[in-house]
Amino acid sequence: IEIVDFLKQPRKYVAAGARIPKGVILYGPPGTGKTLIAKAVAGEANVPFFQTTGSSFEDTFVGVGARRVRELFEKARKSAPAIVFIDEIDSVAKKRGNSLNAVQDQTINQLLAELDGFETTSGVIVMAATNRLDTLDDAILRPGRFDRHISVNLPDIKEREQILRIHSRNKNLSTKVSLEDIARRTAGFSGAQLENTLNEAALLSVRENSPSIAMRHLDEAIDRVIAGPSRPNKVISEREREQIAYHEAGHALVGLYNPGVDVVQKITIVARGRAAGYTLQTPEKNENILQRKNDLLARVRVTLGGRAAEEIIYGVEEVTTGASNDFYKITNVVRAMVGSFGMTDVGLTQHIPTE
């Protein structure tokens, strides 16, 4: 709303002695609607919208990226007031280390020059999006360039329900479908994934010649978004099927004895995508903004429950590769606990680099 008002009434802010922001960075996970927000701002302000990606400035030849930056901003100035939107800006404006890339360095410098060259009354505002704010060059982020850093997080349960209601307006849902229940079961989904869930459910209902989208279609759609379509023709031996079942049961059993972890909603050994099975867990109530140390340790225990079950039933020498993704997930959690959250004897400082 603030940016819209800047574009509509810049003189009001100049008269008050206020410096109008030149740049806004939207940061957050993929699919959360950063591009949609930028388009909505341009639409609300009724100004031209120039959209590009950071990768479009990249080139093997020195000077090409800088020229493309100049050309983009020249078009925006001629159409002012306007919004320039650079998606995935991190691909062109990453932190510059000791080993400078001449092409990247020249492109960043040209982008900085364009931002510095804007007058506060020019009517051009630059918006950019990134999944990783911490990877951007410090020169980009300083005041006077990208003044506003706006976090666009994954939606909580209420926001997911609202998003589902918006995307279901043109869908023929059964009266028995509960969007509140779907919102509860899709914790961690982005807006794009929620839209895709409803679309997948609609496709499934059409294939069945069903008069409406039922809960079974949404159940299958959620599974598809999480792990991919089922592979009913996948050949799995009885021994492997049994091991997969014990593995998934291990996750669920440990979850029952660890308060604070997400509630087990579903266990399946139906092969989907690259997964031979999976256990779906969702928060009992609203998702917590802050994570306690005990909660993180409980998550680690539950994640290791699958491998523990394999060792108990079959022995250490007969464990499978089924826990590889589990190890990947808990490694990230433990690294953060040690290196970022100060939850161990290592100390209250950050030790682990972001990359």
Image (cartoon, helix red, strand yellow):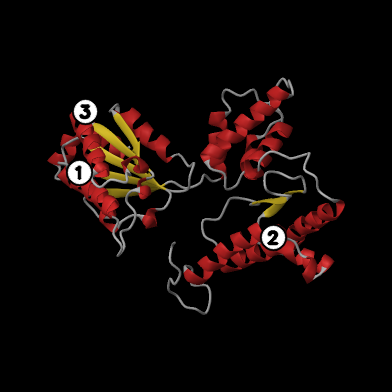
Distance from label 3 to label 1 (Cα)? 16 Å
Q: Decide if residue 15 is on the left or right side of residue 126.
A: left
Looking at the rendered image, the quarter that the C terminus falls into is bottom left
Crowd tier of the residue under label 3, counting other residues whose Cα lies within 10 Å: few below 14, some 14–19, many 20 or above: some
Q: Secondary structure at mark 3?
A: loop
Q: Decide if residue 87 is on the left or right side of residue 8.
A: right
Amino acid found under the numbered disc labelled 2: Ala
Q: Would you identify the image quadrant in which residue 199 lies?
A: top right
**Residue 141 place in picture, x, y as percent:** 29, 54
Mark 3 sits on what residue? Answer: 79
Looking at the rendered image, the quarter that the N terminus falls into is top left
Between 162 and 325, which is closer to the camera in this rendering? 325
Mark 1 sits on what residue? Answer: 114
Residue 263 is tagged as: none
Q: Would you identify the image quadrant in which residue 54 lies?
A: top left
Residue appearing at x 32%, y 44% in the figure: 59
Q: Is residue 319 visible?
A: yes
The reply to whether callout 3 and callout 1 are in contact (CB within 8 Å) is no
Amino acid found under the numbered disc labelled 3: Ser
On screen, residue 194 above or below 328: above
Q: Decide if residue 88 is on the left or right side of residue 189.
A: left
Q: Secondary structure at mark 2?
A: helix
Mark 2 sits on what residue? Answer: 323
Q: Secondary structure at mark 1?
A: helix
**Residue 136 place in picture, x, y as percent:** 34, 54
On screen, residue 252 above or below 28: below
On screen, residue 277 above or below 11: below
Residue appearing at x 33%, y 58% in the figure: 95
Please tell me whether mark 3 or mark 2 is closer to you in this view.
Answer: 2
Residue appearing at x 25%, y 32% in the figure: 82
